[in-house]
Amino acid sequence: MGAVTQPAPQPAPASTTDRRRIGAEIWIVLGLSLGASAVYAVVSLIAKLTAGPLREQTATLNASRSPREYLDLSYQLLGIGFGVVPVMLALYLLWTPARTARARIGLDLRLPGGDLAYGVVLAAVIGVPGIALYLIGRWLGVTATVVPSGLDAYWWTVPVLILSAVQNSLLEEVVVVGYLMTRLRELGWTVGATILTSSLVRGSYHLYQGLGPGLANAVMGVIFGYWYHRTGRVMPLVVAHTILDIVAFVGYAYVKDLGVLQ
């Protein structure tokens, strides 16, 4: 698989002025991206809980936005494109004259073989227990029925679902792991507090699917956060997340008729 790289370097402690700036910057970046998603997810969970049992609710990912084929395609592509903007913002803010942001968080192609191999392993480690936790959550009634794709069957459906998987992966792993953990360490947070915060943010914006997926994604966040701390590389996490989402989004069309996910 190739050697695992060194742990993410410890950033130099920030001055009082820089701490205020970094704190404000974190709130702005999260407010423009996954922090906002977390707030909406909490409201969505409350709405589901007050509407009836969670087991009778549905959470649809990649929902259709228009009954008109090419208008729907336009909306989907626009959503994917604008969804990458917070990633670009986070990378821009992490850039320094001495080192590019992609090199700083390990979002580069320096170790393609190792990143791919470790990404596949991480996907397996997360994916199998994730399915089990989803089914347990459904049985306990704390998880809504998750529909990974609500798109109609068009010629562009699979490519759009793959692009959506890549966009989700970049957004979550760059912002919640690479960017957030780097900035929190600059603020002097401990490794444990940094990983815990990153994992809780990840879990929070999945709460619209129910309590089970929120907890499962928080656990995923602990594993991914620890990996990043130990290796300093986000790329294997992007690979793993992309694999998980492609399997869920594209594979759903082939298993939905079996009733396994109900």
Image (cartoon, rainbow, N blue to C red):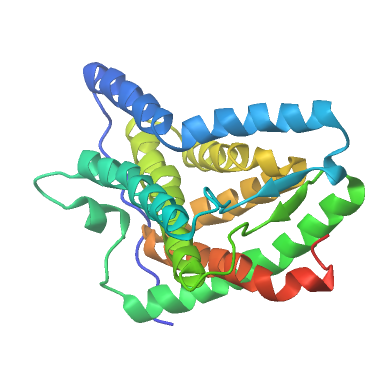
Q: Where is residue 129 in the image (x, y as percent from the top left)?
A: 73, 64
Frontmost residue, 163 versus 242: 163
Q: Give the quarter of the figure containing the N terminus.
A: bottom left
Q: In this view, does 94 lie to the left or right of 247?
A: left
Q: Please tell me which residue is depicted at 39% across the width and 44% down the height of the picture.
A: 175
Q: Residue 61, can we see it?
A: yes
Residue 25 sits in quarter: top left
Q: Position of residue 178 (x, y in %)?
A: 37, 48
Q: Residue 3, can we see it?
A: no
Q: In this view, does 40 lie to the left or right of 108?
A: right
Q: Please tell me which residue is depicted at 71% across the width and 32% down the height of the picture.
A: 45
Q: Give the quarter of the figure containing the C terminus.
A: bottom right
- Residue projecting furthest to the front: 68
Q: Where is residue 161 in the image (x, y as percent from the top left)?
A: 50, 64
Q: Where is residue 247 in the image (x, y as percent from the top left)?
A: 60, 71
User: Eyeballing the image, is 78 above or below 115?
Assistant: above
Frontmost residue, 241 versus 167: 167
Frontmost residue, 25 versus 191: 25
Q: In this view, does 171 lie to the left or right of 87?
A: right
- Residue projecting furthest to the left: 97
Q: Please tell me which residue is depicted at 33% across the width and 51% down the height of the picture.
A: 81
Q: Please tell me which residue is depicted at 37% across the width and 81% down the height of the picture.
A: 113
Badge count = 0
